[in-house]
């Protein structure tokens, strides 16, 4: 018997066999993805059949239809190897939403307005029911920055925040000034790493601008300073990160 969707916003339950028991809790994070495949049909087949080995809780079509693939009480397989704020089993702690979009390899086409409206409504519903904090509405790229870039710098995070979903601050203007990049060493790099780790990114405070630091900076930029995504910590990146940490502490 096909389950009933957990939200009235879902048009139907299209079950995926790729799920299991949540190993830890509570369910207190929401992870947003793009499908990153040429067609919605191909993405749905991957997510909803055993041969794919991956899944999500919700699938949002370009036209705004919402299908549920895995019940919220179960652990969907969408995050993969990941880290956020000391946690490594994000699948057990999160709800995963796949948004149909071919992504970077498909040219990063804009997300349709109808689709974004549906994503906002779904996220508001999930966050309200699960009491998910704004700072734990995350991109796949936030929790797996070395592997993932979705939902990408074209995703309208500011729009979601203005609708009551997720955390956002106005990015500081991009301007000339000192930068830190791979190969840099010293206390300023350690301070940057401390701020990234304080927000949740998986970096060690070593004082050496390593690959993990570059990847975390790029992920941060992709989510919160999308005007320039290069993994280099410029003045704009540092100021935006400080403001974001302040907003999280005040939330």
Image (tube, rainbow, N blue to C red):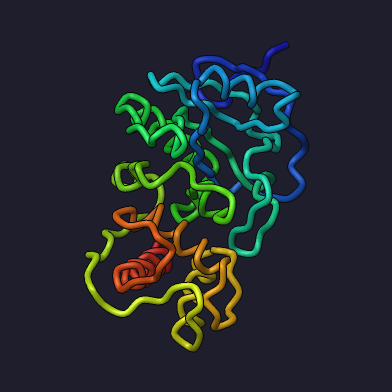
Residue 236 in the image: state x and y as whole percent: 29, 68
- Which image quarter holds the C terminus? bottom left
Residue 227 in the image: state x and y as whole percent: 29, 54
Kindly identify the residue that appears in the image at 31 percent across and 59 percent down.
169
Kindly identify the residue that appears in the image at 42 percent across and 38 percent down.
124
Residue 28 in the image: state x and y as whole percent: 58, 49
- Which image quarter holds the N terminus? top right
Kindly identify the residue that appears in the image at 61 percent across and 74 percent down.
204
Kindly identify the residue that appears in the image at 24 percent across and 65 percent down.
174
Question: Residue 175 is drawn in which quadrant?
Answer: bottom left
Q: Is residue 84 left or right of residue 62?
A: right
Residue 65 in the image: state x and y as whole percent: 44, 19
Asked if residue 237 is positioned above or below residue 31 in the image, the reply reads below
Question: Residue 242 is drawn in which quadrant?
Answer: bottom left
Q: How many marks?
A: 0
Q: Is residue 209 left or right of residue 46?
A: left
Q: Residue furthest top?
A: 1
Viewer-nearest residue: 231 or 96: 231
Viewer-nearest residue: 37 or 155: 37
Asked if residue 217 is positioned above or below residue 182 in the image, the reply reads above
């Amino acid at each position: 018997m096909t389950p009933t969707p957990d939200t009235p916003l879902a048009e139907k339950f299209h079950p995926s066999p790729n799920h299991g028991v949540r190993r830890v809790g509570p369910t207190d994070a929401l992870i947003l993805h793009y499908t990153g495949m040429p067609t919605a049909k191909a993405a749905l087949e991957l997510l909803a059949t055993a041969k794919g080995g991956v899944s999500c809780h919700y699938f949002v079509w370009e036209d705004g239809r919402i299908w549920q693939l895995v019940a919220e009480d179960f652990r969907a397989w969408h995050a993969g190897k990941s880290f956020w704020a000391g946690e490594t089993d994000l699948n057990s702690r999160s709800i995963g939403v796949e948004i149909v979009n071919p992504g970077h390899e498909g040219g990063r086409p804009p997300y349709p307005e109808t689709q974004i409206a549906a994503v906002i409504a779904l996220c508001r519903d999930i966050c309200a029911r699960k009491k998910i904090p704004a700072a734990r509405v995350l991109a796949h790229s936030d929790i797996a920055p070395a592997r993932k870039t979705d939902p990408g710098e074209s995703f309208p995070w500011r729009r979601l925040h203005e609708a009551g979903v997720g955390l956002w601050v106005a990015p500081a203007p991009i301007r000339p000034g000192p930068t830190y990049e791979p190969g840099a060493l010293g206390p300023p790099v350690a301070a940057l790493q401390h701020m990234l780790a304080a927000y949740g990114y998986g970096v060690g405070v070593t004082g050496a601008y390593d690959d993990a630091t570059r990847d975390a900076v790029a992920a941060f930029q992709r989510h919160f300073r999308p005007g320039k995504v290069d993994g280099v910590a410029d003045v704009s990146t540092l100021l935006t990160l400080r403001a974001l940490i302040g907003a999280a502490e005040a939330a």
